[in-house]
């Protein structure tokens, strides 16, 4: 149906999440008809990123240096460590401008059926980092999903076994700002009630 190279381009584009054959075809035709310069810039950026971007040797975030700019920043509070699942979570938390500690990125969550165990989510590196930085508090900011909760529990048990004085906290779950109670699902509302805190 397509020429060999068009076919190759379409199937390469399909490796992106959420891109099916129709979208891949539309992207390929767009690049070939009206976006050849953008296509070349994309190819170059992809090649440079794939070859040069690695994982920070401390927090496992993506960067092109051995240590990322957050870990290398002396202004950050090294006694606080926030554990998240993905680099996108770091961006989301950074955008709140409320957190000045360090991060550790699991690059996923525990999922034994998919072959993702403690080593795959970087548990040995995490234990090393907590010791090296003399962390006082670890904030578990994995997603509030079954897998995210299970991963958080696993990590807390491990950390507590290693150092019973380490403070382990979990981000709060609850009502989004600006929303109305009647539209909140009962799981979230129940959790918000259970996790209530004093106002003053
Ligand atoms: Zn880092």
Image (cartoon, rainbow, N blue to C red):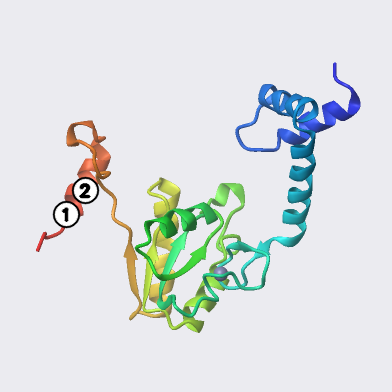
Q: Which disc number belongs to residue 196? A: 1
Give SS at disc 2: helix
Q: Which disc number belongs to residue 175? A: none
Return the x and y of residue 169 as percentages of the image width and height: 32, 66
**Quadrant of residue 15 in the image?**
top right
Return the x and y of residue 156 as percentages of the image width and height: 39, 67
Left-right relation of 177 to 89: left
The residue sitting at 45% across, 63% down in the picture is 83
Return the x and y of residue 90 as percentages of the image width and height: 48, 58
Give SS at disc 1: loop
For label 1, count other residues whose C-alpha is less than 10 Å away and answer few (under 14), some (14-19) or many (20+): few
Figure quarter occupied by ligand 1:
bottom right
Separation of residues labelled 1 and 2 (CA atoms)? 6 Å
Ligand 1 within 8 Å of the CB at mark 2:
no
Q: Are marks 1 and 2 in contact (CB under 8 Å)?
A: yes
The residue sitting at 37% across, 57% down in the picture is 96
The residue sitting at 11% across, 59% down in the picture is 199
The residue sitting at 85% across, 16% down in the picture is 1
Left-right relation of 98 to 15: left
Most foreground residue, 184 or 36: 36
For the image, the number of numbered tags is 2
For label 2, count other residues whose C-alpha is less than 10 Å away and answer few (under 14), some (14-19) or many (20+): some
Left-right relation of 80 to 56: left
Q: Quadrant of the C terminus?
A: bottom left
Most foreground residue, 121 or 3: 3
- Residue indicated by mark 2: 192
- Residue furthest right as drawn: 4
Return the x and y of residue 148 as percentages of the image width and height: 43, 52
**Quadrant of residue 38 in the image?**
top right
């Amino acid at each position: 149906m397509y020429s060999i190279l068009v076919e190759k381009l379409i199937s390469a584009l399909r490796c992106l999440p959420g891109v099916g054959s129709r979208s891949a075809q539309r992207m390929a035709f767009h690049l070939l008809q009206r976006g050849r310069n953008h296509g070349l810039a994309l190819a170059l950026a992809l090649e440079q990123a794939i070859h040069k971007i690695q994982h920070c040797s401390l927090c496992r975030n993506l960067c092109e240096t051995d240590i990322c700019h957050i870990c290398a920043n002396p202004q950050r509070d090294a006694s606080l460590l926030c554990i998240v699942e993905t680099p996108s979570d770091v961006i989301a938390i950074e955008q709140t401008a409320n957190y000045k500690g360090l991060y550790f990125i699991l690059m996923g969550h525990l999922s034994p059926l998919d072959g993702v165990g403690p080593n795959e989510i970087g548990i040995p590196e995490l234990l090393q980092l907590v010791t090296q930085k003399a962390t006082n508090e670890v904030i578990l900011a994995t997603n509030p999903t079954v897998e995210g909760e299970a991963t958080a529990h696993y990590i807390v048990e491990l950390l507590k076994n290693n150092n019973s004085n380490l403070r382990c906290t979990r981000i709060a779950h609850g009502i989004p700002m600006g929303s109305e109670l009647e539209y909140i699902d009962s799981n979230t509302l129940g959790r918000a009630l259970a996790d209530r805190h004093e106002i003053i």
